[in-house]
Image: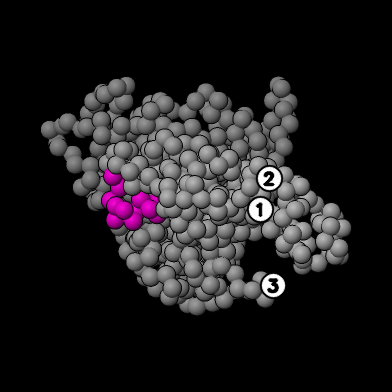
Amino acid sequence: HDWISEKDNKKSIFVTSFSTSKTRLIRLLFLTRVHRSPVNFAAFKITSPKRIKLNTEMAAMQASSFSSTLIPTKVEQDLFDICLATAALEGKGTTVRVAGGWVRDKLLGLNNDDIDLALDNMTGVEFGKSLQTYMKSTPKSSNVKTNVIKANPDQSKHLETVTAHFCGFEIDITNLRSETYSDGSRIPEIKIGTPEEDALRRDLTINSLFYNLNLKIVEDFTGRGIADLENKICSTPLDPRVTFIDDPLRILRTVRFATRFRFNIDPAIITSCHDEDIRLSLSRKVSRERLGKEMEGMLSGRNAHFLTCLKSFHEMNLLPLIFTTNLFDDIPYREEVTPERWATMLEATTCLDILLTDGPSFLGPLISTSSKRTSLLASALVPFDGVVSNKMSKNKPLAESFAVLQWSLKLKTRDCSDIAIIVGGLSRLTDLADSALQRQNDPLFRVDLGVLLRELKDLWKPCFLVAASLRLHSRTGGSVPPNIETMEEHIEAFKQLLNSIDGLKLHNVWTLLRPLVNGDELKTILGVSAGPKIGETMRAQTLWQLEHPQGTKERFLETITSTDK
């Protein structure tokens, strides 16, 4: 045995090499103490007269797995000891592994309280019962409550799973498995599998790592999981075409994970998404409800960055499939939305992203968690501005932005309505911004601005942000100014509009502006019963009050009675 060790910041690498009669095998054990900061894989170096080249050796060893160890916390180790004791009760020689996310996050120096256990020769239900039996036999005689979650493919739960809240962790327990997919469904036929089969069926190599509790090592059966973590790459265990045709939802998960960890997406994945079979599989196999759930995660999930997700989808040419109402075509596509319009949307959303994070200070009062989410979603739907949908509601065509969100992503009606209102109000708000300085002494400017604000209500803030980003884009051609001063010059009109809203006291005008005369009083004064005339007069009263902010009830009554006569 040759033993080479180099220490760096309490991290050590040990290389053990040995020969067999047929082939030379090299096993690498990374013994890594995981602290709060991410592991610096680049710090590991091998200095040896043998000049072992990791990449060359790994490429040649398709049959062997890359093993690394990590150090669980005391609480985690206590949990793992209980799991091993539970498995020992059955006497089957069960190997217990932690699968996926917890392993990935530990190697990245991140905390994760969700632990997925994978068993090689027991079902989750069997293990759950043994866990309860074992805990009752301990000195503290703890009672662990387990729940059986039935398979639910729409939630990506293809196998019956046992869950438990234990030692401060949320635990899912299943057996290792292999999956076989039919052509028309992303719901697989499941069989008990080997660790290799279980790893290869997963969406990404970084999610295919196992921590073997029995051996206390990390197992990389794809041979690329550790390397992809090191190189910050999202790649599939198998050929992307195989992985995505089986379950095309994995495409969206890839984008979400890449964004969450700020990893790059393997170019082979980008290329595969242009394949018509994969595109057809995405449009047919993945429910629109599931697409909407993934989209929400990209908007407001952990470490979400919606712009990055949109850019990835654009590279994959998937925006026309995700945002569409043509749900019955083989390859859905809206002719009204050209590739150029999608590209312009991305440039404008880039401007919006900068305004939300590093924009001029006068935008600060408009920015909140809610307005960020709403403005980003609205910005993505701007390509549909002015497009009339073939979908109807109460015999009237819907705005295409509403229809896309309702039919394509199955978002809540409130979200659909809000985005349609924002997109529909962009041009009017921009026109008012452009005329704010010239019309500052025009009483009707207050009317026009007040009417729009009453229509937008709280949505005026995200509408303002999107409109400002579109102006910034039009002035810069998508090349965002390097400093705030230049940026502010390009959207000076919107700063003036915001000053006008303050100066004209139009904040919350949709709630603060109360009618001087109610409907019942108008019936008596005008001598009419309820009907269109009352509604018209009430609307006229709103306009009169916006034009005459100091007007009184008596003055308004004089106006309507003289007008009526």
Crowd tier of the residue under label 3, counting other residues whose Cα lies within 10 Å: few below 14, some 14–19, many 20 or above: few
Question: Which residue is found at the position 53% from the left and 29% from the top?
Answer: 76
Q: Are marks 1 and 2 in contact (CB under 8 Å)?
A: yes
For label 1, the residue is 544
For label 2, the residue is 551
Question: Which residue is found at the position 25% from the left and 37% from the top?
Answer: 17
Crowd tier of the residue under label 1, counting other residues whose Cα lies within 10 Å: few below 14, some 14–19, many 20 or above: some
Mark with earlier residue (1, 3) = 3
x, y percentage for residue 389? 55, 73
The amino acid sitting under disc 1 is Trp
Q: Is residue 451 left or right of residue 24?
A: right
Instruction: Assign a secondary structure to mark 2.
Output: loop
Viewer-nearest residue: 310 or 19? 310
The amino acid sitting under disc 2 is Gly
The correct choice, above or below, for 394 with respect to 562 in the image is below
Question: Which residue is found at the position 44% from the left and 53% from the top?
Answer: 435
